[in-house]
Amino acid sequence: MISKANKMPDRRQATAVADLARRLHSSAIRLLRRARRADIALGLPPGQSSALSVLVFGGAKTLSALAAIEQVQAPTMTRMIDALERAGYVRREQDASDRRKLRIVATTAGTKLMERGRDARVQRLAQALGGLDRGERMALEAAVAILERLPQGSSEE
């Protein structure tokens, strides 16, 4: 970090930013874990649920792209997709622009399942936020607006 006053690195500012990042990381993980407890009702293992979520909310992907996003090896992703396909939540389609490629696409049933899961997670978060007073909610709204302006990485949700 560069201090505006003297254009020199400011270790205290860098330390404060790193501490804020650690606190945000911990808080975000705890909040997501709390929300993900609702995913148990979906009846899918976490890996399958995560892969299906990527397809529903991020669009069709090749198996290798999905494996990279989910940070698993292709054989692991193949097993997950096979299970999701047997359950009727995804299907394989040939890519229109390159018939050698197969894309994994969420079905209507898969989309409805993930939307139901998202609604349940949002409801859990809303219940938690309901305990905040008006000032705290306004502060959180301002913080979320700032987070939404941060540059996005290359990974998919």
Image (spheres, rainbow, N blue to C red):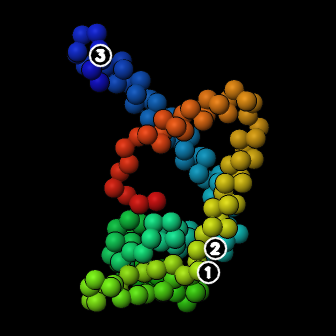
What residue type is disc 1 on? Ala
Q: Mark 3 and mark 2: span between their CA atoms?
A: 49 Å
What residue type is disc 2 on? Leu
**Mark 3, residue position:** 3
Q: Which mark is residue 21?
A: none
**Mark 2, residue position:** 113
**Mark 1, residue position:** 109
The reply to whether dot 2 and dot 1 touch (C-beta < 8 Å) is yes
* Viewer-nearest residue: 20 or 122: 122
What residue type is disc 3 on? Ser
Q: Mark 2 and mark 1: span between their CA atoms?
A: 6 Å
Q: Please indicate, yes or no, whether residue 76 appears anywhere in the rendered image.
A: no
Residue at 28%, 83% (x, y): give it.
97
* Viewer-nearest residue: 47 or 58: 58
The quadrant the N terminus occupies is top left
Q: Is residue 107 left or right of residue 74?
A: right
First-in-chain label (3 vs 1):
3
Whole-percent x, y for residue 68 in the image: 34, 68
Dot 1 falls on a residue whose secondary structure is helix
First-in-chain label (3 vs 2):
3
Q: Nearer the viewer, mark 3 or mark 1?
A: 1
Residue at 61%, 47% (x, y): give it.
31
